[in-house]
Amino acid sequence: MNSRRIILGAAVASAMVMQVQAQEVPKPGKMTPDMTEFWEPEVKSVAAPVNAPPADAIVLFDGKNLDQWVSVNDPSKPAGWTVGDGVFTVKKGTGNIQTKQSFEDYQLHIEWKVPAGITGKGQARGNSGLFLASIGKGDAGYELQILDSYENRTYANGQAGSIYKQSPPLRNVTRKPGEWNVYDVIFTAPRFKEDGSLFSPARVTVMHNGVVVQNNTELRGPTQYIGLPSYNTPHGKSPIKLQDHGDPSEAISFRNIWIREL
Amino acid sequence: MNSRRIILGAAVASAMVMQVQAQEVPKPGKMTPDMTEFWEPEVKSVAAPVNAPPADAIVLFDGKNLDQWVSVNDPSKPAGWTVGDGVFTVKKGTGNIQTKQSFEDYQLHIEWKVPAGITGKGQARGNSGLFLASIGKGDAGYELQILDSYENRTYANGQAGSIYKQSPPLRNVTRKPGEWNVYDVIFTAPRFKEDGSLFSPARVTVMHNGVVVQNNTELRGPTQYIGLPSYNTPHGKSPIKLQDHGDPSEAISFRNIWIREL
Amino acid sequence: MNSRRIILGAAVASAMVMQVQAQEVPKPGKMTPDMTEFWEPEVKSVAAPVNAPPADAIVLFDGKNLDQWVSVNDPSKPAGWTVGDGVFTVKKGTGNIQTKQSFEDYQLHIEWKVPAGITGKGQARGNSGLFLASIGKGDAGYELQILDSYENRTYANGQAGSIYKQSPPLRNVTRKPGEWNVYDVIFTAPRFKEDGSLFSPARVTVMHNGVVVQNNTELRGPTQYIGLPSYNTPHGKSPIKLQDHGDPSEAISFRNIWIREL
Amino acid sequence: MNSRRIILGAAVASAMVMQVQAQEVPKPGKMTPDMTEFWEPEVKSVAAPVNAPPADAIVLFDGKNLDQWVSVNDPSKPAGWTVGDGVFTVKKGTGNIQTKQSFEDYQLHIEWKVPAGITGKGQARGNSGLFLASIGKGDAGYELQILDSYENRTYANGQAGSIYKQSPPLRNVTRKPGEWNVYDVIFTAPRFKEDGSLFSPARVTVMHNGVVVQNNTELRGPTQYIGLPSYNTPHGKSPIKLQDHGDPSEAISFRNIWIREL
């Protein structure tokens, strides 16, 4: 009975639905708080006492010896720098030294000191360097400058905290000769494509004595003393390198070096 | 005289040049080292004694008073938390507090401590939060979680060092209750277009007790307790906010807070 | 004679130099235009006649056969879709098809058409999908949605030009059923670290009928029909996949497909 | 037989499960498909017939006049280039022209043609330029090079499709003199901080005749003919500029120019 009326009713209902659709859109269902809680994987704990390296750190220098380092000129030979009093010091003429181990992305802690009696000026005053990745002999690699930049002006992209000849530090935080400086570095290595071309450039964040001086800075390529940098040398994991700049002045010392792979 | 011969010579020379061009390409002139030395502007010096804030820091808490802070519920009212012994402590029920001053991109240093006698577990154990930018009343903003995560598991994106409900910390570096934790934060505020849509998301790097736990992490939007974050609220410079989570447990303390505008 | 005066003069000169140094800094040497001209390597030429694929393109469908494609369910079997009149068409129930070849970063051109007589609405109207990288059976991968979005509203992140369930298109550029649509896609594959964690997310730029609808959009992970995407499945080069959505409606056709490795 | 053993086995298994459970963590609640469907805001439709500008495009040249352009030397004066046959052509010596309107982020379509009878070589052969943002008189701005690069080698970062003196095109896609070339450009303007320093660099994607030649390339600063680019000139929205290079050769023509603000 009355099937016509029913059909009519259905048509009316259908028209109403269409009218509603013209005005409204579905609302996504309500989520609950737990739906955005992610439990796995559990985050690893690496807490350590104040001033101790984190639990997952590889100690590259603990004050005793240079066992983690070798000569850059001949990696089969030990690092020839001087160890004493819990620090090690550049030994002029022995050349750069680098870690035995290779790294890709990492966090590095390193402390360096220009001797109190430093002389010279500009680049010839307490010059060394931390190569974030050594990609060959000599100074090949990505250099974070080490220099006495305390009341010693030089070009901005050549002072302490600079990515040498590329990026000046945001601030000059260098302490007086005789005082220790700290670099805390977060380094992301460049990646290359199969054909050797660049996929993504190196990036670095540097805290100098607790002040950010490089904030996720993009590197243009390996450091060039002359000319413009570019990524011509594809590479993978690399050692970290310290520079014997060979200057006629008192030598730079280092202590308390550790690294964490990221 | 002999202009024909000269012309001929010119034609020969021209042909030779063309032949050379078919084989070789010009070599850019050699640069000199000074051409990539940038002297201006001079980098500002902000060096400070060990453990002192950098010279360009704005001290947000020096151990004496909360003059740099106000109540979030009523910014015309002073912050109602408790000051004593060089620290200040959440006063349950007084609500969140925020800085008088607004900031955009910055570096922030802050130390926090869960009391030794803490009870409860999961999120109900030493819960507070650092809102990297407060964009409204209550908990509106971008929260870097503060929690007792020492042997107190919760969801990874809700533990200390997490961008709450977004990004877990890379590592758990939380010290025991009763010990001080340090956050060193580099924050890049989001930018919005004229029409209110997002131009670039917020980014943050966090060092927790000297260990990188967020490495230039991209934030998805303001923190959402329920549901998915998105950038619906365009904003400019914003105060920094600390959370009164109102938990039935001992309260969190803070000390040694400073900020540097970037 | 008067050596004292000379010495004095030298001292004065020296003082002047010092004064000058206090005010001025060295100026980098002037470069010449050629120093920023880079001749090598020579850029490869790939020019082609109007509407022809570039000279370095791999043609994935030239109108004749599906020789470049296989069944996703059983990659040892040929793609079972229908070829005719210079196009190929989804054959309902035969399942998804994918390229024989795998790709990493690339530019892709593809044309698709919803049949003129399409019925249904929302997601059930001309639904297919282009998986920018197929990372498993079925619908595993990163889906750029294909749908009749001409006067057919659905959720913004599910319409034509969307990264499905992630990123809505900037604009709706879908043409009427019966007309051809063009996607020009620039895809950067995600990269993973040795431990399987994400190094860099996938990125995509999409031009839909010549209008940019995705502008270097960062993908959150492989497409999830339910829940939140994340990068849990490390992978390298991957096939490109087209979806047999199995809807009870007329089927989608494709033509003129080519790809260039980047 | 041996049901006790079986039961025991079950109890052991159960205990093992409980032990495992003691190690397990809460599972987030299951989401439903609609929870990741975003309906608002509705995506605007801009579909247009094949070869017509999108519906939201501002037509900068429709074949009839240069009403949207002015002289760069004197923006109060009309653009002095030659209009005819649906195209306009550089009128040597009248100087650069720029749009009346200023733009920030945008998509631009432009077609250009080197005349069939072109002579000269290297940079002196069909030289013009598209300044993605004009930031001053003359050639101040960010130049996407226009040049006859068909069988006409020059430095890679100076040929058609290059960001001049910065980034070579990925491929050379230049057609023969007498044929039309197409640039489809997606430009993101640089952003500056309050103090005038750079917040984010300009970025550009360029399709040349349908081939990607710049893929979200980061610009180093405004174009420098001599020396190194850097962001010394903060600016907001800017006109788009075309170059009268003033070469002793046949002039370049343009047609079919439209832009969409992003």
Image (cartoon, coloured by chain):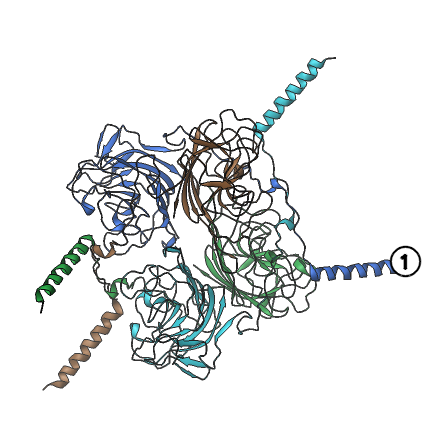
Chain colours: A brown, B blue, C cyan, D green
Q: Position of residue A76 (x, y in %)?
A: 51, 44
From the image, tell me which residue sits under label 1: B2
In the rendered image of this protein, does residue B173 appear above or below residue A13? above
Q: Is residue D17 left or right of residue C87?
A: left
In the rendered image of this protein, does residue A242 appear above or below residue C172? above
Q: Position of residue B70 (x, y in %)?
A: 26, 36
In the rendered image of this protein, does residue A19 appear above or below residue B39? below
Q: Say which amino acid is labelled 1.
A: Asn
Q: Position of residue A132 (x, y in %)?
A: 47, 44
Task: Tell me if residue D192 can be seen.
Answer: no
Task: Tell me if residue B24 can be seen.
Answer: yes
Pinpoint the chain carrying mark 1. B
Instruction: Provide the secondary structure element on which disc 1 rests.
Output: loop
Residue under the point 39% across and 65% down: C171
Q: Nearer the viewer, residue D48 or D101?
A: D48
Q: Position of residue C105 (x, y in %)?
A: 46, 63
